[in-house]
Image (tube, grey):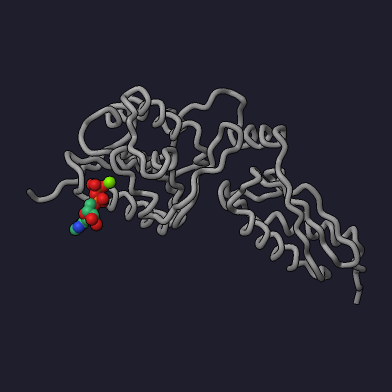
Amino acid sequence: MVVVPLTDDSLTEAVRAALASVMDPEIRRPITELGMVRSVQVTDGRAVVGLDLTTSGCPLKDTLTRDVTAAASGVDGVTDVAVELGVMSAEQRAELRRLLRGTDAEPTIPFAQASSLTKVFAIASGKGGVGKSSITANLAVAMAADGLRVGVVDADIYGFSIPRMLGVDRPPTKVDDMLLPPVAHDVKVVSIGMFVPPGQPVVWRGPMLHRALQQFLADVFWGDLDVLLLDLPPGTGDIAISVAQLLPGSQIVVVTTPQ
Ligand SMILES: Nc1ncnc2c1ncn2[C@@H]1O[C@H](COP(=O)(O)OP(=O)(O)O)[C@@H](O)[C@H]1O
Ligand SMILES: [Mg+2]
């Protein structure tokens, strides 16, 4: 039998390789590809992993620390793992943004491109309280459970209820001017409610709403989606018209009650 000696160098390499299995929970790509692994050093079986977070207040640092520790601990010969958290520099964030967007150009709406494979459905109704948000949330979760990659935009300025229905309680993470949507039940979620102080009414008029919707669609890093659902406010007002303009390929699901 040949015994391969476990040197510090070979263990360091093995830990690095193991970290490629750790996904960033928001971006859903290996942390090694995203430039988040700053350093790996194994000394006498003790692994120290330097991890750079996208933002200092990264709400997912506990998840990341746990996943990194688990992956590194799984390497034969590693007896102990320490994770040293840091924060990406402005340069690293710009690099990450370029990597994700694939370009330095101004953000465009990916779903409006002719090459887009994402099916877009706007959930609409003539009046409020008929079940739009319930339909949107349930459709999204059911489709995600079926293995589709799903995103939801809650565009109901009069009563954003999607975050509460899906159990999302934090805003998107900012990487430069790019927003990483929170994920719940495997669904990426962005709501107009994430951008207004709690308990305050939205008093935006048409142009502001148009700009907000455009931002949700262009500045949010959605990744490759199979389906995008939009929960619209009731009626055929500003938001509905903006959706038609910004997403000419979208389809409408109209929700009504029997009366
Ligand atoms: N299929 C349904 N049957 C009965 N009640 C429903 C149904 N769908 C939704 N509801 C209830 O109706 C109310 C309004 O639903 P919601 O989805 O918030 O409507 P909307 O988004 O159109 O305002 C909620 O209390 C919800 O629980
Ligand atoms: Mg609603």
| Residue 109 at x, y percent in the picture | 45, 29
Q: Is residue 227 visible?
A: no
Q: Residue furthest bottom?
A: 1
In this view, the residue in front, 1 or 238, is 238
- x and y percent of residue 90 in the render? 70, 33
What's the residue at 44%, 28% (across, down)? Answer: 113
- Picture quadrant where residue 204 is located: top left
Q: Residue at x 50, y 37 (%)?
A: 220
Relative to 194, is 108 above or below? above
Q: Position of residue 106 (x, y in %)?
A: 54, 23
246 horizontally vs 224: left or right: left
Residue 250 in view of the camera:
yes
Image quarter of residue 202: top left
Residue ID at (36%, 40%):
200
Residue found at the very far front of the displayed protein: 199
* Picture layout, residue 141 above or below residue 232: below
Q: Is residue 67 above or below residue 148?
A: below
